[in-house]
Amino acid sequence: MRFKDIEGQRVLINRLTEIIDTGRVSHAQMFLGPTSSGSLALAIAYAQYLNCEHRVHYGEGAELRADSCGECPNCRKYEELEHADLHFVFPSATTSVVTGKPCSEDFQEEFRDFLIEKHQLGTEDEWYARLGIENKQGLIRERDADNIVKTLALKSYEGGYKVVVMWMAERMNLTTANKLLKTLEEPTEKTLLLLVTESKDRMLQTIISRVQQVVVPDMNRELSEERRGMFAGMFVAWMRLLFKLDMKTLSAWVDKTAGIGREPQKCFLQYVQESLRACYLKTAANIELPGELSFGDEKFDTFFPGMVTARNIEQMNQAMTDAIYAIERNANAKITFMQLSFTMSKLIKNR
Ligand SMILES: [Zn+2]
């Protein structure tokens, strides 16, 4: 799949293609987000772009700045999901046909058909329904791990990157996860392991700490006009407080934010993460993302983007990712937002 066929996610896609173009590809990455947000499609498109022989660049000002060509031999095989160096691992269970100890290898054809039919957006339940195992819990088992280790150790067929895409990585059992640790730590050259997961909570910390995280925002829960307005107001107030760092007003802001509930808090942090990225694009490359950079306050809209620079964007991004993770893990919201405020305050001043 080419990036252009994925709905939304332009900010994230531009970041991903930039990373590949500058040759900073991390050998193990975790795409975190619901499958319906396109996390799996993004992972596959990412691998296709990496292997494309004639990447297309549309220029700095374009909404989508780069994409795979869709026409070179690698792209063609990727579009059909038939590339010899593209491997899929996913949860499975015993079925009427496959008894004994099942693994992804036994269901490759079914899985490819499922991906093509559902445009790589099919859910875990839909996958189980297709296998006829609605009442069972699929797992990614030891044999899957053995296959991954073997696959990644072999030479690539086509000379490019060998890629293993693991969908619903949170379904790995403990043995599987442990077997992968060595591969994560000592990767062979030109290999890429993409773990696609909906829930970081269910992933082992030892795995999480060894992979680079790519947070895929859930576009299906597109912010309502009302919520966007509320988040923009919260963001403007918050950023202004960070300059002054007046503890009394900041405490009040934190208390209020801690009271809105976990789900809205998570959405707010994702909104902030996207907004900061958009600010950075505006200052660094003079790219305007339509509709994304108005916070409803003209003065703020003009001066704030300049506060986000190459010096602080990555750390800000990481701070947001960490805070989202903390909120997901039921960390104390007041402490999380207060610590995040101090971190952000420092980063903004260090631009
Ligand atoms: Zn291509």
Image: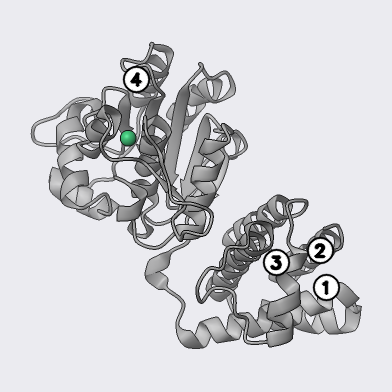
The numbered dot on residue 173 is none
Q: Which residue is mark 4?
A: 147
For residue 242, the mark is 1
State whether residue 332 is above or below residue 117. below
Alpha carbon distance from label 3 to label 1: 20 Å
State which tag comes first along the sequence, 2 or 3. Answer: 3
Q: Is mark 3 within 8 Å of ligand 1?
A: no
Nearest to N terminus: mark 2 or mark 4: 4
The vertical placement of 26 against 128, above or below, is: above
Quadrant observed for ligand 1 in the rendered image: top left
Q: Which residue shows up at 60% across the image and 64% down it?
A: 278
Ranked by sequence position, the earlier of labels 3 and 4 is 4
Q: Mark 3 highlights which residue?
A: 332
Q: Tag 4's secondary structure? A: helix
Kindly identify the amino acid type of the residue bearing the numbered disc 3: Asn
Residue 178 on image: x %, y %: 51, 26
| Residue pictured at 59% horizontal, 85% vertical | 230
Circle nearer the N terminus (1, 2)? 1
Q: Are marks 1 and 2 in contact (CB under 8 Å)?
A: yes
Residue 258 visible in rendering: yes
